[in-house]
């Protein structure tokens, strides 16, 4: 992220300001703000110095605001998963908000003022303070263990913490694992949890959904599993879930029969769709179209050469929006893709229920198929287009076998086009490496999907 000039977006409000926010340029500024020494050799105490600076996450809304989270390390070889607690986390926000800027530090660069906040002084994620120190993290987890599994005593010297996700002002998720002494059975056992800190309302929604799905799973034939809640702290906005052990879906597809694996995926997804969760908001074709319009507007703001294509694409999607399903709306995962599944080939755990809604099951089907197809666009996975296509067709065939009905190809393509636009905006908004090329590719495929081209790579 932000490692090349071509990855720095330009819009009428931010101009070229973002180009100055590269880790190399920000390292001395953030070091000075945090009062840290300039090199490992001259450091002391808990902050022996800063050797490197990396971007952890970004939230960029063209023409509106920009938030970039950085981590400052004293070791160039630090594993990215150890960004916290090994490094110092902070984030930059532009433009300055006068009502809250006093909580941070206002700085100026290139004639523009921006805010810098150290972590965990992020006012919306105050729950992290329970885990910023190792001893306090152990104490908090032991309190949860005493309620969840009485008889287990955490061994603090075995406690390890790592960062899974940090989105400034929205959420942070960390992984904790440790050994515990089992006072009842004797011996040691391993335990691990994922702890989420967000708004109280957000944590409460996810907690209710996890409980509902765990309760419903006992009465369905679906093969999906949901992590068990360990603790929900409504005062601090924290939710702890048991860690989902097992292989990723990509690993499972690589080492097992893809048709069999996808059969379990579709069986679980179909069962999830049939589960009732109270309080879910509807997700209609109008909502999907609105998200596509938002994506197109944001992409057009930073990619002028795509504006005509995006305009034509939105016009096509508006004309060809599929009718509402004839049956009742079903429970949707809302963000169903390969990284939301973990476990064994015949027993998968579903993760991240943050975007659950009520709507057409094809929303989940199209998103999953699109993401599988796009694996070949991710060089870190080294998956060929032929392999990604084969996995995708295995999934779509398994879905038809599971549901006993053919997929409506026209509606599927429409949802796939919306999914591709959404993914393109996500690559840009989070300033993913080489996002301009990703955006070009996804927008082109979205246009193909919306026009019902017969050679579309993610065709049914």
Image (cartoon, rainbow, N blue to C red):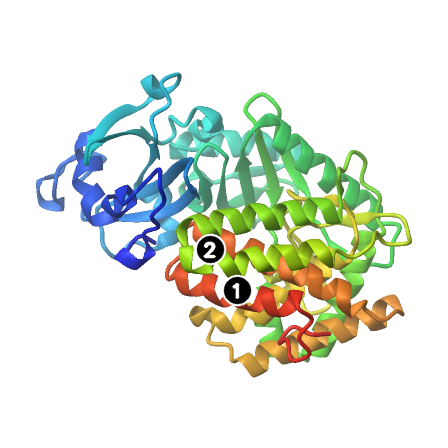
Q: Which of marks 1 and 2 is nearer the N terminus?
A: 2
Asked if disc 1 and disc 2 are in contact, CB closer than 8 Å, the reply is yes
Q: Which residue lies at the image location 67% right of the left edge and 57% below the top edge?
A: 317
Q: Which residue lies at the image location 52% right of the left edge and 61% below the top edge?
A: 309
Q: Which residue lies at the image location 63% right of the left edge and 61% below the top edge?
A: 417
Could you tell me which secondary element the residue under label 1 belongs to?
helix
Q: How many labels does the image show?
A: 2
Whole-percent x, y for residue 419 in the image: 62, 58
The foreground one among 269 and 433 is 433
Question: To which residue does mark 2 refer?
Answer: 427
Q: Which residue lies at the image location 41% right of the left edge and 65% below the top edge?
A: 437
* Other-residue count near label 2 (Cα within 10 Å), few / some / many at <14 / 14–19 / ≥20: some
The foreground one among 9 and 450 is 450
Quarter of the image for residue 224 reads: bottom right
Question: To which residue does mark 1 refer?
Answer: 442
Could you tell me which secondary element the residue under label 2 belongs to?
helix
Quarter holding the C terminus?
A: bottom right
In the figure, is residue 76 to the left or right of 211?
left
The foreground one among 443 and 397 is 443
Q: Residue furthest bottom?
A: 386
Whole-percent x, y for residue 215 in the image: 82, 43
Question: In this view of the protein, can residue 132 be seen by the observer?
Answer: yes
Quarter holding the N terminus?
A: bottom left
């Amino acid at each position: 992220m932000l490692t090349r000039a071509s990855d720095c977006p330009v819009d009428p409000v931010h101009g070229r300001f973002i180009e100055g926010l590269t880790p190399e340029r920000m390292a001395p500024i953030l070091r000075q703000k945090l009062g840290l020494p300039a090199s490992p050799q001259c450091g002391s105490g808990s902050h022996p110095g800063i050797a490197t600076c990396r971007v952890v996450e970004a939230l960029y809304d063209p023409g509106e605001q920009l938030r970039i989270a950085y981590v400052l390390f004293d070791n160039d070889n630090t594993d990215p998963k150890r960004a916290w607690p090994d490094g110092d986390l902070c984030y930059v926000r532009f433009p300055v908000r006068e009502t809250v800027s006093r909580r941070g530090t206002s700085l100026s660069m290139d004639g523009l003022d921006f805010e810098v906040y150290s972590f965990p002084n992020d006012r919306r994620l105050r729950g992290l303070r329970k885990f910023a120190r190792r001893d306090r993290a152990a104490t908090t987890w032991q309190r949860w263990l005493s309620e969840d599994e009485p008889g287990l005593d955490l061994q603090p010297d075995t406690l390890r913490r790592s960062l899974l996700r940090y989105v400034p002002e929205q959420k942070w998720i960390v992984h904790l694992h440790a050994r515990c002494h089992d006072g009842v059975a004797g011996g040691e056992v391993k335990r691990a949890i994922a702890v989420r800190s967000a708004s109280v309302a957000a944590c409460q929604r996810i907690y209710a959904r996890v409980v509902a799905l765990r309760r419903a799973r006992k009465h369905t034939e679906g093969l999906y599993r949901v992590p068990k809640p360990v603790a929900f702290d409504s005062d601090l906005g924290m939710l702890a879930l048991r860690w989902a052990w097992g292989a990723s879906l990509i690993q499972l597809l690589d080492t097992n029969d893809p048709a069999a694996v996808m059969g379990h995926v579709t069986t679980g997804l179909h069962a999830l769709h049939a589960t009732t969760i109270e309080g879910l908001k509807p997700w209609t074709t109008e909502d999907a179209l609105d998200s596509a319009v938002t994506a197109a507007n944001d992409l057009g703001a930073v990619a002028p050469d795509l504006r005509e294509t995006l305009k034509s694409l939105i016009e096509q999607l508006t004309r060809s929006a599929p009718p509402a399903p004839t049956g009742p709306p079903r429970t949707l995962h809302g963000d169903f893709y390969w990284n939301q599944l973990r476990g064994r080939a015949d027993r998968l755990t579903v993760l991240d229920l943050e975007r659950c809604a009520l709507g057409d099951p094809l929303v989940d089907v199209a998103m999953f198929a699109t993401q599988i197809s796009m694996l070949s666009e991710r060089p870190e996975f080294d998956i060929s287009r032929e392999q990604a296509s084969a996995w995708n067709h295995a999934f779509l065939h398994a879905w038809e076998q599971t549901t006993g009905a053919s997929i409506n190809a026209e509606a599927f393509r429409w949802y796939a086009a919306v999914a591709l636009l959404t993914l393109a905006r996500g690559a840009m908004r989070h300033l993913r490496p080489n996002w301009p090329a990703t955006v070009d590719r996804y927008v082109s495929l979205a246009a193909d999907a919306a026009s019902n081209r017969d050679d579309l790579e993610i065709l049914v």
